[in-house]
Image (cartoon, rainbow, N blue to C red):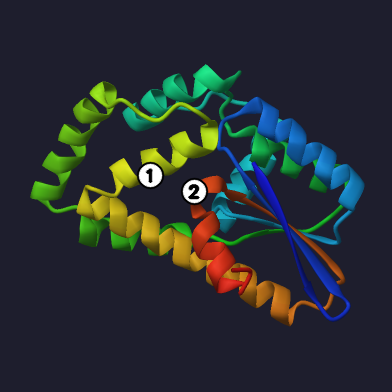
Amino acid sequence: MEFIEIRSKEKLMLVCFGIKGLVSDGNAVKEKLDSFKPEVIMMGISPEEVEGLKNFVDDPFEIDMSDYELIYGTLLSQFGPVEVPPPIFTQTIIYAKENNIPVIGLDVDEETFGTRYEEEYTVSQMVGYITKKRKLKKRNFDMESPEKFVMQWRAEIEKTRAMGNMEKMREEAISENLNKMFKEGTERKYFAIIEYEFNNEVKRKTNYV
């Protein structure tokens, strides 16, 4: 988990890079929201996913997980309890709902994602997708910290071209939309919660590094 502050004249943005799935990171996000008291909240997921999480918080339902998510969750559980949907997002939605704060999804919308998915996943790429699952189960990841694990997980995922291209598309959209919202917004305090593995691109886009 990492927090960075970005200032621009009278405006302040607190960006949280959290580990997707870890309950402890969700608790840390809640504490930070309680103390920061943002006027606008942004999340590194699609607008449709934001609405889906609102529905889940109001009326929880069973969520199907992909094989990749199951492997990821099993490995991540070495660092503590894991939940689905990711607590870093559900805790954010709960806070926004309780405090009547608008929530903006920074990721590409589902239609754009679906169109790109169809373009990327040829037959050969689908074979690679299936093969990669077997390799991930046998891979020895760096488990020194959850941050090192998720960065290495992403590096492994991106060895499959289609998956890498999809992740880069998401990363670019999240970074660009975050930057745009902060520059063009009229509110004074902004909070963003984004998956840890996107931290390098977000910092670059916001001129933090």
Relative placement, left or right, of 149 versus 11 is: left
Q: Horizontal and vertical percent for residue 48?
A: 56, 53
Which of 1 and 190 lies nearest the eye of the viewer?
A: 1
Classify the position of the C terminus by image quarter. bottom right
Residue 154 is tagged as: 1
Q: Residue under circle 2?
A: 197
Relative placement, left or right, of 90 versus 151 is: right
- Residue that appears at 53% across and 38% down: 147
Which of 146 and 112 lies nearest the eye of the viewer?
A: 146
User: Which corner quadrant of the image does residue 185 belong to?
Assistant: bottom right
Name the secondary structure under disc 2. Answer: helix
**Circle count:** 2
Relative placement, left or right, of 69 versus 5 is: left
Which of 161 and 50 lies nearest the eye of the viewer?
A: 161
- Residue that appears at 75% across and 40% down: 29
- Contact between marks 1 and 2 (CB within 8 A): the answer is yes
User: Which corner quadrant of the image does residue 114 belong to?
Assistant: bottom left
Q: Residue furthest front?
A: 144
Give the residue type that dot 2 points to: Glu
Which of 136 and 200 lies nearest the eye of the viewer?
A: 200
**Is there any visible trace of residue 188 in the rendered image?**
yes
